Image (cartoon, rainbow, N blue to C red):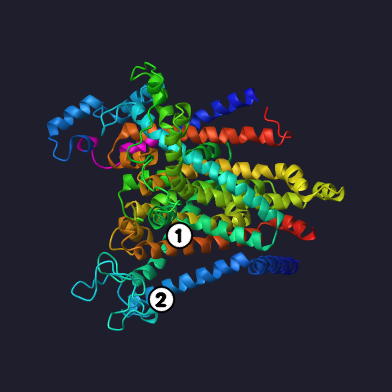
Amino acid sequence: MATSSAALGAATARAQDANANSLWRVALRRIFRRRSSIIGMIILGFLTLVAMITIAEDLLQTRIITPFDPNQQFIGDKTIKQRQAPCIHALGCPATQQEHLMGIDANYRDLFSRVIYGARVSLIVGLSTITFAIVIGTILGAIAGYAGGWIDIVIMRVMDVLLAFPSLILAIAIVAVLGPGLINALLAIGIVSIPAYARVVRASVLSMKEEEFVEASRALGGSHFQILFRRILPNSLTPLIVTGTLGIATAILDAAALSFLGLGAQPPTPEWGRMLGDERSQFLAAPHLVVFPGLGIMLTVLAFNLLGDGLRDALDPRLSRSDIGIKKE
Amino acid sequence: MINYTIRRLIAAVPAVVGIMLVTFFLARAIPGKACYAALGEHATPESCRAYEALKGLDKPVYTQLYFYLRDILQGDWGTSVHYNRPVVDFLAERLPMTVELSVTAFFLAIIVGIPAGIISARYHNSFIDVGTMVGANIGVSMPVFWLGLMLAALFAVGLKGTPFFLPASNRLSAGLVAKPFFEVYGWDLVPGTVTYSLAKFLSGLYFLNSVVTLDFKTLWDAIRHMILPAAALATIPLSIIARITRSSLLEVLGLDYVRTARAKGLIQRVVILKHAFRNALLPVVTIMGLQLGGLMAGAVLTETIFGLSGMGRALFEAIQQHDYPVIQGFTIIIAIIYVTANLLVDLSYAVIDPRIRLD
């Protein structure tokens, strides 16, 4: 008897696994069918690769894709002028001059190398802030939704207050308290992003709480912790992934804005927003110092936005149903 | 509806109080002392103490909080530490610029974004649709400060001397002054009164002021100065509104009643504009309300780029100068705008969709 019930349990588990697998496979197939998510993934893959290579460059102390050290200053070199325009040999720049694909910045550094290193900073910024916000937001939202009552009211009112501030302004205020710097800017943006995730998780916990499988788990003697983290939360994953991906885009934009205002990354960190902000008054004399970092920000944010949109279309069954409706039309 | 509005306003009180508390404690948590910001770095400890006693900053925090809340409720918003003038005055001076900028950007986003979304949905999967959505995706990913710089370079420098030239700094050309309407019409207002502050605020809205005073030269100049900042600020909300309009309309266009409308031989334009659009509007309105907060944040960056002395810029400077009363005053205004915007969104649901009953 005991063995048969164990076998039955194993079979159910296997069936569940297969089911989960196929669900994920369906989702993946949908993601790969979307043009926007494919383009997003290609750009992101490229940026991630670039970021990995710069890490390898740092670890191995060699240059692989960046021609120069991002912080190396060509001060003694008489052939190099401050804020010099890009020099590309293939485009007619005299071969006697050293090649600088994106020119030279105000501190006689190679801009191309700095822009490439900026990819790493931006990706780290986006991923770390949103991971922080998701973890804290999930815990708060889950507790609020699961516990209900006054705990729910207190947590969600606090979240409402945080949401009432324009995110960048609240982030500026938090950075003012913590002091300027990249880490503090990340923390500020992370804090500002928490309410969105708390709301998402709370909403799905509320809708899941009374489901039969939760009831079953409770009847079997599952602890609150087990029910919440093993039964309910895995089912809230989809909206979190979508909100998180789109949230990374906003976080990168906000971080760049903070650095642009001088509150985020400090010199000599090669951060795109900071590079742009430092040179904005020189825009007319040396447009390359503003254009390239800006393109970097845009490309990264665009990639996360495209991927987020693709994920939402693929994972949100409500939207895909309407999609089918359109196709029939 | 009136009942509902009153109930909603009462329900908003905790949020506003919460915002005031957060601002109060955040402002006081900023490291460094306010007296050094006001009196300079070399202030002596004695003058610092005297200053703190004068401003009540030597009292315990909860006493300060009590005075702060009491003063706010009595209409006394305090005096700027840095500029040594009433916060209300300062607000009346700086707020109009931001309001004018945000409202212009908001309308720009709506009058371009909604038609773009409708056209995109009408020609679903066509060249126009793909082009619009690529544009919208890029627009939503563009840093405001970068776009602002590019626009300034193109229109203020690149096109200088052509009819397409647009100014990229200040609100009016040198030599032009927007004379306040109350001075033009010879009203005798006493500085320091609520009426005066209100009149000052309204006259700071240059569009409104120059229409009222029939000064169309100034109006035209103010509009030309507003185009670039408003365009930069509008890009993100515009793109978001276009995308939401498109997807919402596509969803509605797949419904049976639209098929019925088509089946009875109505032309496409009537089907989309008369039958489908209104039902597609709810998510669009929700998004529009949410974008207002974003406009406020974007204003800080836009004002920095275009050298405009508005509220966003003032708030940014106040935070750096430990100017508590200014920080608090401005955040309360932001909170009120946010709460009002949310309320308007909820009320507009009932107007758009009569099935939604508010009471």
- Position of the C terminus of chain B, as image quadrant, is top right
The answer to whether residue B10 shows anywhere in this view is yes
Image spot of residue B325 (x, y percent): 33, 31
- Amino acid bearing label 2: Ile
Magenta residues span B23-36
Residue at 37%, 52% in the rendered image:
A258
Among the 4 quarters of the image, the one containing residue B154: bottom left
Residue at 48%, 54% in the rendered image:
A250
- Amino acid bearing label 1: Gly
**Subunit that carries the residue with mark 1:** A
Q: In this view, does A145 lie above or below A48?
A: above
Residue at the bottom extreme, as displayed:
A95
- Position of the N terminus of chain B, as image quadrant, is top right
Mark number for residue A126? 1
SS state under label 1: helix
**Magenta stretch contains residue B32:** yes
Image spot of residue A326 (x, y percent): 75, 57
Q: Which of B101 and B172 is in front in this view?
A: B172
Image spot of residue A45 (x, y percent): 51, 71
Answer left or right for B81 relative to B73. Answer: left
Residue at 23%, 76% in the rendered image:
A79
SS state under label 2: helix
Answer left or right for A97 relative to A139. Answer: left
* Residue assigned mark 2: A53
Mark number for residue A192? none
The answer to whether residue A221 shows anywhere in this view is no
Sequence-wise, the earlier of marks 1 and 2 is: 2
